[in-house]
Structure formats: C-alpha cells, structure tokens
Amino acid sequence: GQNIDQPTEMTATEGAIVQINCTYQTSGFNGLFWYQQHAGEAPTFLSYNVLDGLEEKGRFSSFLSRSKGYSYLLLKELQMKDSASYLCAVRAATYGGSQGNLIFGKGTKLSVKP
Amino acid sequence: GAVVSQHPSWVICKSGTSVKIECRSLDFQATTMFWYRQFPKKSLMLMATSNEGSKATYEQGVEKDKFLINHASLTLSTLTVTSAHPEDSSFYICSARDPLGMNTEAFFGQGTRLTVV
C-alpha cells in the first residue's frame, strides 16, 4: 500500500532552525515534494527531490534518501509567517504518462513562537 | 510560472442541490487534472483523475455518480457535487501539471470551500 508518515505537530522559536521528517512507502517512486499550506488555502510548492541528496532554495532545504524512503525539510531563520502546515508528497510510479498524481502525507503543523 | 485557477473560492448550498466547481489551467494545456478533498486538519485525499476527452478515473470509495467530472477541453475540468449533503462539506482542490514545462511540480487551484446546509 501507500504510506507517508510525518509528525503531526512541531513548535519552534523565531530565528531558529527546524527539521520536518517524512518517511514513505509507495508502489514506485517518481519524485518527492514539499508543500506549504496555510489554513484554508491551497498548498504552495516549496521543493522537489528525485535524486538522493540535498536541494537548497533560500531558507528552505530538502533532503532525500531513496534507499531509506526518507526525506526532510529544513527551515532556517524561522519567521512567524512560516507557521503553517507542511505537506510531504510522493509522486508514485508513472500514472497517465509523466503526470502521475501526488500522494500526500497528513501534514505537519508548525507553530513558530516569538 | 504555470497558474491554475479554481472557481468559486467558496459556496454555500442547500442540501439536495448540485454545485459545480471549475478548474482552469491559465497558461498551459493540461491533459490531466487531479481533484482532491481535504477535511479539517486532515491531508489532501485524491478523489479522481480527470482526463481530457475521456472518462475520469475515480479513487476507491469515491462515488462517480455523485462527483461528476467533465474535462471537455485542455484547459478546463469541472467537478459537480450532485445532491449535496452536509457530509460533503469540505475543501475541494484541483491541481494540474504542465506536461511541456520545465517545472515538475503540480500547481494547485485556490481551492473551494463547500458548505452544505
């Protein structure tokens, strides 16, 4: 079956660094995504990993280990506006060609405190 | 970047009526679009895959006669919630990916908050 696990909630302090972990077990793998979602809004794209290693984009970095079925999202220099849910999603084996759907984890609600 | 527009952003309807939600890809052609539902404090759950020019593919447990999907053009998919009931109240989101673009991520519409009273 398809299973994506991530912590339900996390709390961190403004200016600090936080790491959100994600483990997955899916039938096939065609990329892992991290999205940010504020309450009542649609998700917005943060990062994409398809090969092992670290992808850095400003204050956000994402790491992938395909052999371990593991990824993490690293947020640096936390700001209050970073308070949101962070969704880990996997594109499983190709579905309809290269446009496979995403399987989402339940999301990690991050609260950033002053 | 690619943009997906969803309309309406919120709707309140009476129990037993039908509601149509539109999802448009504004600057690319999407042969495939995805419809998700999200209950409060829960993750996005894929409902169905909308395929241009053919029938939608529904996930297990999703009633195709209740959630009608039409993908009549390369830029528009619609989801109609028929005979809506209060338990259908949820946040519905569509997404699409530009098959010709350099980006690999899926772009999401703004979402539609449906409340059935």
Image (cartoon, coloured by chain):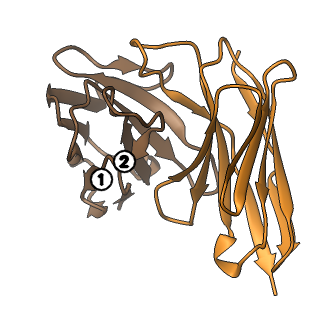
Question: What chain is tagged by disc 2?
Answer: B
Name the residue carrying label 1.
Answer: B15
Is residue B92 depicted above or below B12 in this figure?
above
Residue B82 appears in the figure? no
Query: Nearer the N terminus, badge 2 or badge 1?
Result: 1
Check residue B24 in the rendering and tell me which mark sits there, or answer none.
none
The reply, left or right, for residue B110 in relation to residue B7 is right
- Locate the C terminus of chain A by quadrant: bottom right
Q: Is residue B74 left or right of residue B86?
A: left
What's the residue at 78%, 75% (across, down)? A112
Q: Residue furthest bottom?
A: A114
Q: Residue at x 73, y 60 (%)?
A: A109
Estimate the x, y position of residue A80 in percent, counting from the top left. 70, 80
Instruction: Look at mark 2 in the image and give the residue it sits on.
Output: B85
Q: Are marks 2 and 1 in contact (CB under 8 Å)?
A: yes
**Amino acid tagged 2:** His
B7 over B81 or under it: above or below: below
- Do badges 2 and 1 share one subunit? yes
Colour applied to chain B: brown
Question: On the picture, is A87 further left or further right than B111?
Answer: right
Q: In this picture, is B21 found above or below A101?
A: below
Q: Secondary structure at mark 1?
A: loop
Name the colour assigned to chain A in the rendering.
orange
